Amino acid sequence: MSPSKIVITGTIASGKSTLCKLLEEMGFKLISADEVNKELLIPGAKNYEAIKKSGDFDQAFENESLNKKKLAQIIFSDRKKLKKLNQLSHRNILDEIEKQIEILDEKVVFIEIPLFFQMEEKFDADEVWLVVADYQIQIKRLMQRDKISLEYAKAKLESQEQLLNMKEKSDVVFDNSTSVENLSTQLKKVLKQKDLL
């Protein structure tokens, strides 16, 4: 029997990783789309080869190695390039996640997909759990985490889709504007309601 697939998503610096960490600490199986992508960006792997062959991201390559910071700068300043990169990589990421799920013997598996609602490629999830946080708190967290300026933090947040739309499409919404303890309390309540705890 294949496990139930619950996607964890949310805007940048909302606390998706914190929620995922709490789930892992409780013994749940978690797959991270970012970690899957890291593996696919190793020289010779699918996404590395697709990006290299496209010729659109040559500035991000130094000899044979892909400079992820340069790649991020390219896509952050050019929406067309971002779209192109997504078209090249998203399907491969989702296919790999499906492969990993197929071999699991679990009741439920959580999949962290940061840009779940922005993806053109669709992933067949049983439920979507959204993590949100107060805008000012997100800005502060982003500046501290990525050591960036207020302007850059605001620009990064503006580049994400509006929350309202995401809330409507989600099965569960967690507010992570206060503490980890508060988030943990919300999580335990939801897990009990869904008979997962």
Image (cartoon, rainbow, N blue to C red):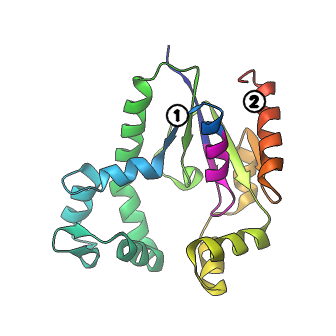
Pointer 2 residue: 191
Q: Nearer the viewer, residue 154 or 160?
A: 154
Residue 2 lies, with reference to residue 168, above or below; the image says above
* Residue at screen point 26% across, 62% down: 51
Q: Is residue 186 magenta?
A: no
Q: Give the amino acid type for the residue marked by disc 2 in the picture.
A: Leu
Q: Is residue 13 magenta?
A: yes
Residue 109 lies, with reference to residue 50, above or below; the image says above
Residue 60 as seen in the image, left or right of residue 147:
left
Pointer 1 residue: 124
Residue 87 occupies quadrant: bottom left
Place of residue 119 in the rendered image (x, y in percent of width and height, measured from the top left): 50, 52
Residue 98 lies, with reference to residue 85, above or below; the image says above
**Within 10 angstroms of label 1, few (less than 14), some, or many (20 or more) residues?**
few
Q: Secondary structure at mark 2?
A: helix
Q: Secondary structure at mark 1?
A: loop
| Pointer 1 or 2: first along the chain | 1
Q: How many discs mark residues in the rendered view?
A: 2
Residue 6 occupies quadrant: top right
Residue bounds of the magenta highlight: 8-22
Residue 115 lies, with reference to residue 69, above or below; the image says above
